[in-house]
Amino acid sequence: MEEAPKRKKRGKRRLFRIIGSMLSLAVLTYIAVTLITGRPLTFFGIFGGSSDGGYFEMVDEYYFDVGRSRVFADLGGSLAAAGTLGIQVLDAGGQEALRDSFRMATPAICALGGRAVSFDVGGTSVRVFDKSDIIAAIETDLPVISASINRDGLFAVCTQGAAGSRGVVTVYNSDGSVFYRVSLVSGYVLSAALSPDSKNLAVLNLTEEGSRITFYDFTVADIDRVCDLPGSLTIDMQYLPSGEVVAISTESLFVVGKSNEFTELFNFSGSYLGAYALDGNIAALLILDNNMGLSGRLVTIDERGILLGALETDKEVISMSAGGDYVAVLKGDGFVLYNAALEELPVSGLSTMTAGASCVVVLDEGLTLAAGDNSAAIVRVRE
């Protein structure tokens, strides 16, 4: 009866050794997660409730010139884009408010509280900016794995480690000065998150035994606690307003409490995670029946683990995002908007550009972006 667990344990160790032999496990893992989920390295959430039943219409079309592989973020009324040629910010009227030209092979962006951090995954360039100014321009010594920012403007940059290190996390003040640094000797760094009160740092890393979150307390400049995560690979995490951490693995969505207690919100073991959006107190997940097919279901879940909506789907999902009362999904056969209960909302006046769109992003105030090769259509609720 114990043979199966033994085989599973040997298989896990063998897989870890194979991955560990790669030049940069952490960078490759994080890029792989991004590609598999079909989302940029920026996180958007939904906050429950249903829409007001408003009618949606296309109201504007923005034009970006930042190269290929573009990703987007909301800067509270302005729109930021990062691409292979740098970053660009357009104001509410579609006029350019900021541009910084530099090369990125794999652009990524994360925004919160009117500020954004853009970075080159596997490269060394990092920019922190708001609607009109570059706050910090950083060139790291080692390749960047991921980066994040909190509402106070603190930002954390995860890089590969030098000899003897499995990765480094550097925390910067809102002015771009170094505030705190952690060098891990055990477990490869995947990502880091800063607490809403700017007092703690959570680092997600991969060890030979599995996933782990290490919490650091800035007030004592030391490890606060270590939480070894059971089961499958944990691929992402975020702080909740409560100070707890919500995380998602390849089998479940769960919360880690302040005393390392676990609360499982949603289990999808036996299925496959196709895409997800985390933020605030809610999650939207695309769960596939198998890793090669298109059939599955889209679900929305609140912070208590209550299922808000569920919708069967058999269409390819190219991109998905969520925010406010809305969930935007770009499928192989078109662009669809839902409320938090996953009831489809009508949209009119979409330009033909959306037929070739490659990503969608839910913005503030009921706005949604559908981006194609050369432009982005803005959709809003008609008053």
Image (cartoon, grey):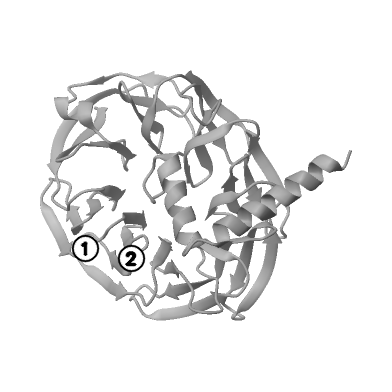
x 59%, y 29%: residue? 307
x 80%, y 47%: residue? 6
Mark 1 and mark 2 lie on one chain; the one further toward the N terminus is 1
Residue nearest the observer in this picture, 94 or 64 = 64
Work out whether residue 51 can be spotted: no
x 47%, y 64%: residue? 23
Residue farthest to the right, as pictured:
1
Element class at badge 2: loop
Percent coordinates x, y for residue 30 in the rendering: 46, 54
Pointer 1 and pointer 2: residues touching (CB < 8 Å)? yes
Work out whether residue 86 can be spotted: yes
Percent coordinates x, y for residue 378 in the rendering: 21, 35
Q: In this view, does 19 lie to the left or right of 125?
A: right
Three-letter code for the amino acid on which mark 1 is drawn: Arg
Percent coordinates x, y for residue 276 in the rendering: 47, 39
Disc 2 residue crowd, few under 14, some 14–19, many 20+, Cα 10 Å: many
Q: In this view, does 364 lie to the left or right of 312?
A: left
Which image quarter holds the N terminus? top right
Element class at badge 1: loop
Q: How much space separates mark 1 and mark 2, taking CA atoms?
A: 9 Å
Three-letter code for the amino acid on which mark 2 is drawn: Gly
Q: In this view, does 141 lie above or below 375?
A: below
Q: Name the residue under label 1.
A: 103
Percent coordinates x, y for residue 350 in the rendering: 19, 25
The label on residue 123 is 2
Which image quarter holds the C terminus? top left
Residue nearest the observer in this picture, 62 or 167 = 167
Q: In this view, does 108 lie above or below 133?
A: above
Q: Is residue 194 left or right of residue 99?
A: right
